[in-house]
Amino acid sequence: GNLPTALVQSGMADVPQKLGETSYYDHILGVIPNNIIKPFAEGNVLSILILAAAAGIALTKMPSSDKKEVVMKGLFGLQDLLFMLIHGLIWALPLGIVAFAAQLSAQFSAGIVMASIGKYVAVILGGNVIQFFIILPLFLLARGLNPVRTLGKMMPAVLMALFTKSSAATLPVTMQTAEDRLGVSNQVSRFVLPICTTINMNGCAAFILVTSLFLMQNGGMPLPWTTMILWLFISVISAVGNAGVPMGCYFLTLSLMSGINAPIGIMGIILPIYTIIDMVETAENVWSDSCVCAMVDKDLKG
């Protein structure tokens, strides 16, 4: 559905075009960290992955010794510490849920118009629900896995993702749940799940596609089938580079739309309800990661 014209025009402010030219070469150099602290301070997931991969390769090349054993025990100790902190977060989640409900109620009472974008929200949530309950279970069934059992075993990770809205923050819980409850090999879970957390963004891809088409439609841009198919591929590729943090998809979509002069002011209307969308799509992302992990583990054991 289209929004009122006046509302759309309020989001047609000119976006500065001289933002500087950045080449792919510059992007690649930007991912490579020049020190160890900077990626963690900036939350640069790709740089952290490069550091983690380098450290992992170096550890495998180190000869067995007491020093290597100390480093390994230290890393596993930090992992256990992180698990304890996350368990504490899970206990605090009920209070967070109450606070979120109160915040959403305040936004409704503040007069935010929701009816005009009801179809938009229904399409995004409907797509995630179809993926969650139909598409992914069909993949599991095709591999001889019981989707109900798999979802039941992975439910702590899925719920964690639902309320934290961050697949990266949920990653330790996802790995622990896959290993302890689902019975996945730790070699599989610790290789597959970190990769999936970065590149397997089904919910984010759906948000980028639907939101982009929604903004372009309200901006009066023509939307033939060729354009929609093109943006389907753009959405999937863009989602691969999205950070697994809250609101990552929102800002990624905002940057894409500002590049084509779409009415980005509409993103401000979407923002109050984006929390719900972010919760659902993050849970769907983690469930998808879990399915990939379970299928890879079954293939390797078979």
Image (cartoon, rainbow, N blue to C red):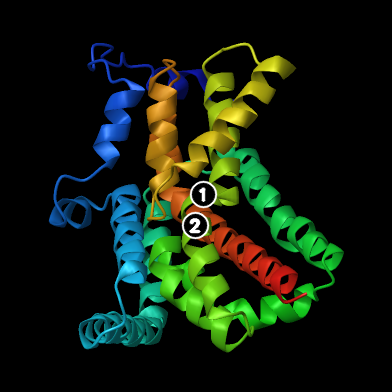
Query: Label 1 is placed on what type of residue?
Result: Ile
| Farthest residue, direction front | 63
172 sits left or right of 117 in the view:
left
Q: Is residue 236 left or right of residue 169?
A: right
Q: Residue at x 26, y 42 (%)?
A: 32
For image coordinates 62% across by 30% down, the residue present is: 233
The residue to which callout 1 is attached is 199
Q: CA distance from mark 2 to mark 1?
A: 6 Å
Question: Residue 204: image x %, image y %?
Answer: 53, 46
Q: Is residue 208 above or below residue 173?
A: above
| Residue annotated with mark 2 | 195
Q: Which mark is residue 138?
A: none
Of 111 and 65, nearer the camera is 65
Identify the residue at horizontal 77%, vertical 55% (top origin).
Answer: 135
Which one is in front, 78 or 154? 78
Q: Which image quadrant is residue 29 in?
A: top left
